[in-house]
Amino acid sequence: MEDAQFIPYREPLHVTLTRNALIALCVGGILAWRTGAIARWPVISLLTLWPALGGHFVEIFFLNFLRPKLSPARTIQIAARLATWFTGGLLIGLAVVLCARPLNGFRPIRWQNLWLAGLIFIGIELTAHLFLQLRHRPSFYNGRG
């Protein structure tokens, strides 16, 4: 993998939007159902669109812009990807909190807890890449994606 040539990731926008909207709708429905707030399903789905669609663009940023500028050494690639996911998770978590505030009334942001969003986002990405790996597709685990 040391002499890898990275191919930019491309996907039609309508495919990206459809997939991520369906993910947000399903996850929003599950969260609304599990919290007993089924009437808030549309709002919860809208908020879950941040990690779904935002996560896609964090991944595109890494694959197409950051990865080609880094050493192809596997350890460097792994560290950079985890750092990108963590930072992206922080920003997405902040966006969710800021968008939810007008919907739930004013609640101050607990900055000391925002780092959890970065860790949760890493977990989401690792899970998504596990499914890619199980389908023998390029993923974080095999170093091809």
Image (spheres, helix red, strand yellow):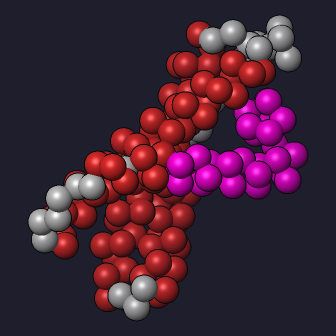
Decide which of 87, 49 is in the foreground and name it.
Answer: 87
Compared to 50, does 100 lie above or below? Answer: below
Seen from this angle, which residue lies furthest front?
112
Percent coordinates x, y for residue 24 in the rendering: 47, 65
Decide which of 144, 127 is in the foreground and name it.
Answer: 127
The residues colored magenta run 119-145
Count the numbered circles shown: 0
Q: Residue at x 42, y 46 (%)?
A: 115
Q: Residue at x 51, y 71 (%)?
A: 27
Percent coordinates x, y for residue 75 in the rendering: 75, 22
59 part of magenta stretch: no
Percent coordinates x, y for residue 106 in the rendering: 12, 66
Q: Is residue 34 left or right of residue 43?
A: right
Q: Is residue 46 left or right of residue 143?
A: left
Decide which of 22, 100 is in the foreground and name it.
Answer: 100
Q: Is residue 61 left or right of residue 47?
A: right
Q: Residue at x 35, y 63 (%)?
A: 47
122 part of magenta stretch: yes
Q: Residue at x 69, y 9 (%)?
A: 71
Q: Is residue 114 visible?
A: yes
